[in-house]
């Protein structure tokens, strides 16, 4: 059973990202503030849901959240500053655009950089422990999937509508045959360099 949030009565925002491990496309992040008394037994980590379930829950989240925001950071920025920093940058952009200022931030994973003096806590696998992170996970995933389908129309040979830019065998074979598109991340051969905050 997922908890609604870590700290009540402070407009806590749950945050998560989607697309960190992809070979192509932007990384998306979402921030969601749910009512303290909100509960939905169907909501969990987006990776544990099918596409239809995620789409239904996306509408549920957008209807019931006190506020939410979804932002992206493109592949050129990812190549420039690395994926970890880009994921955190996308989260910061979300927080900045929220209609309510959160009193606490709850972030999926174990990396984050402070934002505007707001207290935060990182939670490993938080998207299956707290509803506000699960909600952010679902929004980030559905918005990113939508974007990958859209740019996939420009480059149908990579089948991004299906693989969403991840390193499937089909996607890797398409890269080997067609080369890289403008949406591919050039830096992802240097995986170790992608995971530094400094």
Image (cartoon, rainbow, N blue to C red):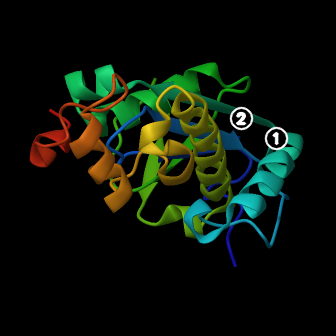
In the displayed structure image, the side of residue 106 where residue 198 appears, left or right: left
Task: Look at the picture and state if 78 lies above or below 29.
Answer: above
Tell me where residue 181 sits by quadrant.
top left
- Residue 177 in view (yes/no): yes
Q: Which residue is mark 1?
A: 62
Tell me where residue 49 sits by quadrant.
bottom right
Q: Nearer the viewer, residue 113 or 28?
A: 28
Residue 26 drawn at (x, y percent):
43, 31
Q: Residue at x 68, y 68 (%)?
A: 3
Q: Is the C-beta separation of discs 1 and 2 under 8 Å? A: yes
Q: Nearer the viewer, residue 176 or 21?
A: 176
Residue 138 drawn at (x, y percent):
65, 52
In the displayed structure image, the side of residue 195 where residue 29 appears, left or right: right
Q: In which quadrant of the rendered image does the N terminus lie?
A: bottom right
Along the polypeptide, which appears first: circle 1 or circle 2?
A: 1
Residue 85 drawn at (x, y percent):
29, 33
Tell me where residue 101 sits by quadrant.
top right
Q: In which quadrant of the rendered image does the C terminus lie?
A: top left
Q: Nearer the viewer, residue 56 or 71?
A: 56
């Amino acid at each position: 059973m997922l908890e609604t949030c870590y700290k009540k009565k402070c407009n806590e925002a749950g945050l998560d990202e989607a697309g960190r491990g992809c070979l192509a496309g932007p990384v998306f992040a979402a921030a969601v503030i749910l009512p303290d008394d909100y509960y939905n037994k169907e909501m969990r980590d987006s990776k544990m849901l099918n596409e239809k379930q995620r789409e239904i829950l996306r509408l549920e989240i957008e209807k019931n959240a006190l506020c939410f925001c979804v932002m992206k950071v493109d592949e050129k920025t990812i190549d420039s500053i690395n994926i970890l920093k880009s994921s955190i940058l996308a989260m910061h952009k979300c927080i900045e655009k929220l209609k309510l200022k959160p009193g606490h931030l709850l972030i999926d994973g174990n990396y984050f950089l402070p934002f505007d003096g707001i207290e935060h806590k990182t939670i490993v696998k938080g998207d299956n422990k707290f509803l506000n992170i699960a909600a952010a996970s679902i929004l980030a995933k559905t918005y990113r999937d939508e974007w990958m389908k859209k740019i996939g129309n420009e480059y149908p040979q990579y089948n991004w509508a299906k693989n969403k830019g991840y390193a499937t065998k089909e996607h890797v074979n398409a890269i080997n045959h067609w080369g890289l598109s403008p949406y591919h991340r050039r830096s992802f051969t240097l995986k170790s360099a992608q995971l530094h905050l400094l």
